[in-house]
């Protein structure tokens, strides 16, 4: 599955956000070209933290809906910062990316809504950026994956790693957790 984002640009080490129709189209077309593909499976809007303003006052979601109708993308959603933004994003979009882990569970209502309405959830910061501390003898990776994948609204999780050994452990652990669920 190919997932890309729109809404944020980096130039000269500086980040700027642009949620206009023209920039959204440009960003998707550029991704299609760079990825050498005819379509992208999922495009997410990268929020600057003003979730409701982006969804209510910009052209980004309407433009993504049009690109979906044209077959250039198969789905679209929102990588936001607030419960209100996540819920609003799922009303019209296919997916929301939320922060959900053992340390942060404020966006659980978005996951609940997604499960009830047949929408997808991608979890970011699934392992709390490596800052989960549990009792001795408790594997924080296993506990994290159990929390995530026991919820029927969670479709996938984005998990970073710093070395191949961690990657192998993460893959083996999530496979065990998914087999149990």
Image (cartoon, grey):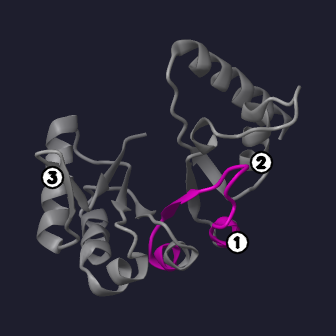
Q: CA distance from mark 2 to mark 3?
A: 37 Å
- Residue occupied by mark 2: 147
Classify mark 3: residues with Cα within 10 Å, few (<14), some (14-19) or many (20+). some
Give the mark, 2 or 3, whose residue is nearer the N terminus. Answer: 3
Quadrant assignment for the C terminus = top right
Give the mark, 1 or 3, whose residue is nearer the N terminus. Answer: 3
Q: Nearer the viewer, residue 56 or 67?
A: 56
Disc 2, SS:
helix
* Residue 55 sits above or below residue 174 on the image: below
Q: Nearer the viewer, residue 8 or 37?
A: 8
In the rendered image, the residue lying farthest to the bottom is 57
Residue at screen point 18% across, 73% down: 20
Classify mark 2: residues with Cα within 10 Å, few (<14), some (14-19) or many (20+). some
Q: Quick check: is 112 in the magenta stretch?
A: yes
* Residue 121 sits above or below residue 142 on the image: below
- Residue occupied by mark 1: 116
Quadrant assignment for the N terminus = top left
Q: Quick check: is 98 in the magenta stretch?
A: yes
Q: Which residues are magenta?
A: 88-113
Give the mark, 2 or 1, whose residue is nearer the N terminus. Answer: 1
- Residue occupied by mark 3: 29
Disc 1, SS:
helix
Classify mark 1: residues with Cα within 10 Å, few (<14), some (14-19) or many (20+). few
Q: Quadrant of residue 109?
A: bottom right
């Amino acid at each position: 599955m190919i997932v890309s984002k729109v809404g944020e640009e980096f130039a000269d080490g500086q980040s700027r956000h642009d949620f206009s129709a023209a920039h959204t189209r440009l960003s998707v077309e550029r991704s299609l070209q760079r990825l050498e593909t005819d379509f992208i499976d999922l495009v997410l809007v990268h929020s600057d933290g003003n979730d409701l303003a982006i969804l209510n006052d910009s052209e980004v979601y309407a433009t993504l809906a049009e690109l979906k109708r044209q077959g250039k993308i198969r789905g679209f959603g929102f990588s936001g910062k607030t419960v209100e933004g996540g819920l609003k994003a799922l009303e019209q979009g296919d997916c929301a990316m939320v922060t959900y882990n053992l340390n942060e569970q404020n966006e659980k209502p978005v996951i609940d809504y997604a499960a009830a309405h047949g929408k997808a959830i991608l979890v970011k910061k699934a392992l709390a950026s490596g800052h989960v501390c549990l009792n001795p003898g408790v594997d924080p990776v296993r506990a994290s994956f159990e929390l995530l994948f026991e919820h029927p609204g969670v479709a996938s999780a984005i998990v970073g790693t710093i070395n191949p050994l961690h990657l192998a452990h993460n893959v083996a652990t999530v496979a065990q957790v998914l087999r149990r669920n």
